[in-house]
Image (cartoon, helix red, strand yellow):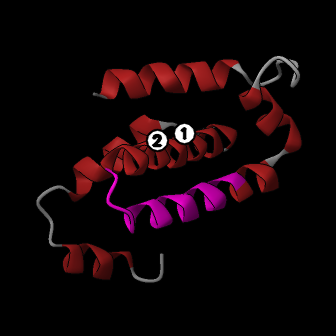
Amino acid sequence: MSDVLARLCREIDSRKGMDAKSSYTASLFERGEDTILKKVGEEAVEFILAAKEDRADHLVAEAADVWFHMLVMLSAKGLNASDILTELERREGVSGHAEKAARGNV
């Protein structure tokens, strides 16, 4: 599973600096962080709405859209899916309540 994420992250990174007319991802990078964040928010709302339906295919498609746009934002910040996977591994086996308390105000 992480191979797909690694390949997607490399592809997203490769779109930085490309002609925005040739790539949707390049156009997001060109328009900047506010545009990318807006897309993350829009896709998150669409995911929430899809969760209220009884269509697994729609929910999965919207989840993929959220993940994609989040990966674009991570790339814009010099991060990628491996950073998230590392954090999830760090949290593995730790109570959610304990992990949240350890973060403080983060």
Quarter holding the N terminus is top left
Q: Please, is residue 46 above or below residue 29 in the view?
A: below
Callout 1: SS: helix
The answer to whether the residues at label 2 and label 1 have Cβ atoms under 8 Å apart is: yes
Quarter of the image for residue 72 reads: top right
Frontmost residue, 61 versus 2: 61
Magenta part, dominant SS: helix
Question: Which residues fall within the magenta stretch?
Answer: 39-55
Quarter of the image for residue 61 reads: top left
Name the residue type under label 2: Ala
Indicate whether residue 52 is drawn in magenta: yes
Coordinates of residue 75 in the picture (x, y in percent): 62, 37
Callout 2: SS: helix
Q: Please, is residue 31 above or below residue 2 in the view?
A: below
Task: Give the residue at the far left of this rendering.
Answer: 93
Count the labels in the image: 2
Coordinates of residue 97 in the picture (x, y in percent): 22, 80
Q: Which numbered tag is attached to residue 41? A: none
Q: Which residue is mark 1?
A: 68
Indicate whether residue 76 is drawn in magenta: no
Q: Please, is residue 101 above or below residue 16 in the view?
A: below
Coordinates of residue 45 in the picture (x, y in percent): 56, 65
The residue drawn where x is 22% and y is 73% is: 96
Name the residue type under label 1: Phe
Task: Give the residue at the far front of this rendering.
Answer: 54
Q: Which residue is mark 2?
A: 64
